[in-house]
Image: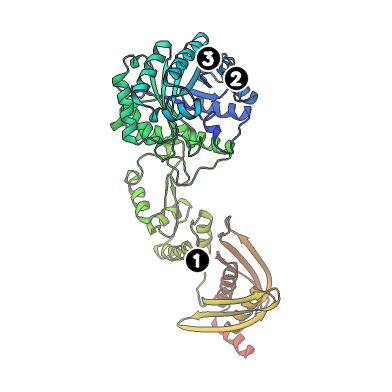
Amino acid sequence: MPTQIKIFDTTLRDGEQTPGVNLNIQEKLEIARQLAKMGVDVIEAGFAIASPGDFEAVKAVAQSVRGITVASLCRALEKDIDRAWEAVKDAERPRIHTFIATSDIHMKYKLRMTEEEVLERAVAMVKYAKRYCEDVEFSAEDASRTRPEFLFRVIEEVIKAGATVVNIPDTVGYATTKEFGNLIKSIRENVSNIHKVDLSVHCHNDLGLAVANTLAAMENGATQLECTINGLGERAGNAALEEIIMGINTRKDYYNVTHKIDTTQIYRTSKLVSSITGINVQPNKAIVGANAFAHESGIHQHGVLSEKTTYEIMTPESIGLSQNKMVLGKLSGRHAFEERLKELGYSLTPEEIQDAFEKFKKLADRKKVVLDRDIEALVNEKVHKIPEIYELESFQISSGNKVISSAVVSLKRNEEIITEAATGDGPVDAAFNSIERAVGFSLKLESYHLNSVTEGKDALGEVTVRVSKDGNVFSGRGVSTDIIEASIKAYINVINRIISELGEEKLKHENNKVS
């Protein structure tokens, strides 16, 4: 039968110790309610004696959030324990969590206490906390750097004193995965009364091993896992709840444990904590990062579209996302592009798809991520088009606030390259004048409109021009990440439309007039 693992969330205590994070009571309550909704077993709501604000926040969580255990951290001091109890006593299931360091380096330089003094204090304070509260957790700070024989002795004695949970922290993230797993195993083997308590672990991420060490500890007998949302915490942070849980879920065949977490609440909880704390989740963060379920490579996209499990070991729906995300970029293939066109409602011929795909690939070389609105702009420009009598070959612009703007534009007609240069009132006007010289007739510009299709510095610009010719009004459209290029494309587009609608003979007549 699978072992039931308990999840102890310390986002409101250790997570708040992240540099730059300072949560008020209402923010702590909002996060606590979401943690309870997600199904954590224990919420460590704060360090009650740290400040009046922290005390009030712990008390508010204890009074307001039901159905879970609410804990307050406290040093192994009577005044700390008194304050912790005052804060959590109204909880449906209160817990006092007391700690003292047990490693040689901490005892010598921080506590200035001997092993015997630390052992005596640990036992006395567990007994003191037990007078208030049935549920008492004891943590041996810096346990992973503690002499094992002394650690075994401390654990055995605090259990005799009444501790219901014993926590083994890798306080500075020093342990390797094998070492930490073996430490938990050795505690199971060398502490005679360990079966009477939940054996907990609290791992920091200084070497990037917090989640790995937590899972290794679980494999070796840990029954409570301490963690935070998004891995927040001191220095490099703590073990990330979302990574632990999805690791367990994804590899049920390997771990053979269960928990009470509703995984569909993971993404919402992550976003809430990120929003309230102001600490953004890195895009490539496991499970909840923006790229966690995003696919850009053409090979990956084709695989996922054929069968999701080719490149997705868990579903986006399992963490509360509606679907995965196909990121269209320069590595994307035609298959993914066609699927996105279908999703956007376009029904195109193979030739139209190929034409749009070629334009998409050119855009993707200049713009890292191509958004749906970019694709729509490309399709509207290139699929619903008139014959391209003239095409843009190249252009060069010279412009500034103290020089006359000039442009050199090369157009391609059939196999002929036509190059002309002109000046104008600004780079766009100069480019338009060059184009008119190249095609051999002039137009009256009635209106010019520039619109940003998407956001950001690399946004696709969409230019729409309206011109008049012989009493008729025509419109043209162009898109590019370069607004000058978009303008030139729009002007060429309207010229092609004029030629297409007025006919070649009309154009020749106009050319003769100009010459």
Q: Report whether 344 appears left or right of 3.
A: right
**Which numbered marker is on residue 382?**
1
Please tell me whether mark 1 sits on a helix, a strand or a loop.
Answer: helix
How many residues crowd around disc 1 within 10 Å: few (fewer than 14), some, or many (20 or more)? Answer: some
Q: Which residue is mark 3?
A: 92
Q: Looking at numbered disc 3 in the image, what kind of residue is underneath it?
A: Glu
CA distance for labels 1 and 3: 65 Å
Residue 394: where, in percent of width, then height?
52, 77
Occupied quadrant, residue 23: top right
Nearer to me, 512 or 506? 512
- Out of 233 and 472, give the one closest to the viewer: 233
Left or right: where does residue 317 sit relative to residue 397?
left
Residue at point 35% right, 41% down?
A: 313
Under mark 2, the amino acid is: Lys
Return the residue at label 2.
Answer: 59
Looking at the image, can residue 68 be seen? no
Give the SS element for disc 2.
Answer: helix
